[in-house]
Amino acid sequence: MMLTGAWLFAVSLVATDVASLKWGYEACDKKAIEYPYPDDPHDGFPIGSCPPPADLALTCGPGGKIAVVDAEASTFESGYMHPPKYAIDEHLSSRWSSHYSDDQWLVLDLGEPKSFRRVYLVWELAHASAYTLLTSNDKKKWKVLRKIRNSDGFVDVVDVKGKGRYLKIQGNKRAKVEGNELYGYSLFDVTICQDLPTK
């Protein structure tokens, strides 16, 4: 794997309202949450932390949100189904969740090489404290866009100048949660913006 152009980026990230948004991970009525996959092995919202507010606004610029045509991952939970496509399915109550180790990744296919300027990552309680964003056109040679350190979860807003067919979110270090427990990585949503929002 070829890595080029890396630099560190601490996640105080961007001075936007959404970047500082927090919600109660355990303060919701889970029976009232509309869950889009009743064919999962268990009826209703699965075990896990509360999702973000249903009206969470992930704003893009004039070019809008880039449609992701497919998603794949190193691993995903299958007892309660949390496959990679759940991170790009437009539902903020569903999520991708990896197995419990640091070296896990999610790759999003944009269909063809596209330029983008912002990536929103909406984390479940099980989040990365450190991860790397990379792009590629062939899934063989990867270019590093950002190395994120010290993420506190919730919503990360990462402004980049990226171009490629594939965007990879490479987990580097899992965050300790709930009394120093280590789970996997879990993303409710990944949104990729062609342009930055206008001020």
Image: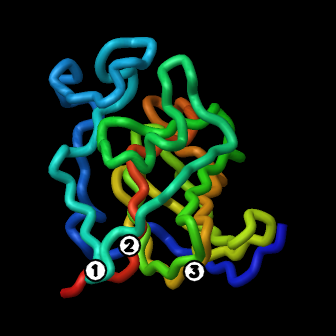
Quadrant into which the C terminus falls: bottom left
Q: Residue at point 53% right, 78% down?
A: 114
Please state the horizontal and vertical placement of residue 72, each as a whole percent of the image: 62, 47
Q: Are marks 1 and 2 in contact (CB under 8 Å)?
A: yes
Q: Are marks 1 and 3 in contact (CB under 8 Å)?
A: no
Q: CA distance from mark 1 to mark 2?
A: 7 Å
Q: CA distance from mark 1 to mark 3?
A: 16 Å
For this view, does 78 lie left or right of residue 27? Answer: right
**What kind of residue is marked 1?**
Gly
Q: Is residue 31 above or below residue 50?
A: above
Q: Is residue 118 above or below residue 161?
A: above
Please state the horizontal and vertical placement of residue 55, each as a whole percent of the image: 15, 50
Q: Residue at point 56% right, 57% down?
A: 108
Q: Which residue is mark 2?
A: 193
Q: CA distance from mark 3 to mark 2?
A: 12 Å
**What kind of residue is marked 3?**
Lys
Q: Residue at point 20% right, 18% down?
A: 31
For this view, does 58 lie left or right of residue 123? Answer: left
Front-lying residue, 112 or 45: 112
Q: Secondary structure at mark 3?
A: strand
Please state the horizontal and vertical placement of residue 64, each as a whole percent of the image: 31, 74
Q: Are marks 3 and 2 in contact (CB under 8 Å)?
A: no
Q: Which residue is mark 1?
A: 61
Q: Which residue is mark 3?
A: 163
**What kind of residue is marked 2?**
Cys
Q: Earlier in the sequence, mark 1 or mark 2?
A: 1
Please state the horizontal and vertical placement of residue 65, each as a whole percent of the image: 34, 69
Q: Quadrant of residue 134?
A: bottom right
Quadrant into which the N terminus falls: bottom right
Front-lying residue, 150 or 46: 46
Q: Secondary structure at mark 1?
A: loop
